[in-house]
Amino acid sequence: MRRRSMRMRRLSRAGSLAVALALTAACQQATSVSVRPSPSPSINGSSVVVVTIDATGMDPRTLHILGGSVIAFLNHDARTHEVRSDPHPAHTECALMNLDPVPPGGMVQTRPIAVGQGCGFHDEGDPTNPALQGFALGH
């Protein structure tokens, strides 16, 4: 009986040691893995960030994107939207946001945004509606 008890303790210790080693290895492996964002769609080699427009507004409205990326505005609303640069009505802050009208079901895209470039934008049809305003910053 005593031998069996000692044998069970050894197995228990061996099992605990194996679990501890496995956890240590997993932690070491996890810290050495670099995390990369999931791949974005691409247009002409540029990453694309999609902003959806619907009856409730634009989503997302705040964009922190990689320099060189383009922003595509996809209209899921029943009416046409016109994305323009801030400030309203001058539209002079960021020329790449002065886009063609986006018909229902349509899409328009910006030129690539530069690193450090900040662009405020709004829907020209409702320029004071916060749900139809946004900001993009290239990193």
Image: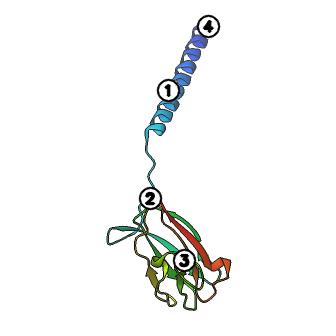
Q: Which residue is mark 3?
A: 52
Instruction: Find residue 111 and report its image quarter.
Output: bottom left
Amino acid type assigned to the residue bearing label 4 in the image: Arg
Which residue lies most toward the top here?
A: 2
The residue closer to the viewer here, 55 or 2, is 55
Measure how far apart labels 3 and 4 are at the Cα level.
71 Å
Amino acid type assigned to the residue bearing label 1 in the image: Leu
- Comparing labels 4 and 2, the label whose residue is closer to the camera: 2
Q: Position of residue 67 (x, y in %)?
A: 42, 62
SS category of the residue bearing label 1: helix
N-term-proximal mark, 3 vs 4: 4
SS category of the residue bearing label 2: loop
Amino acid type assigned to the residue bearing label 2 in the image: Ser
Q: Residue at x 55, y 88 (%)?
A: 81
Q: Position of residue 40 (x, y in %)?
A: 42, 65
- Comparing labels 3 and 4, the label whose residue is closer to the camera: 3
Circles 3, 1 touching at the beta carbon (< 8 Å):
no
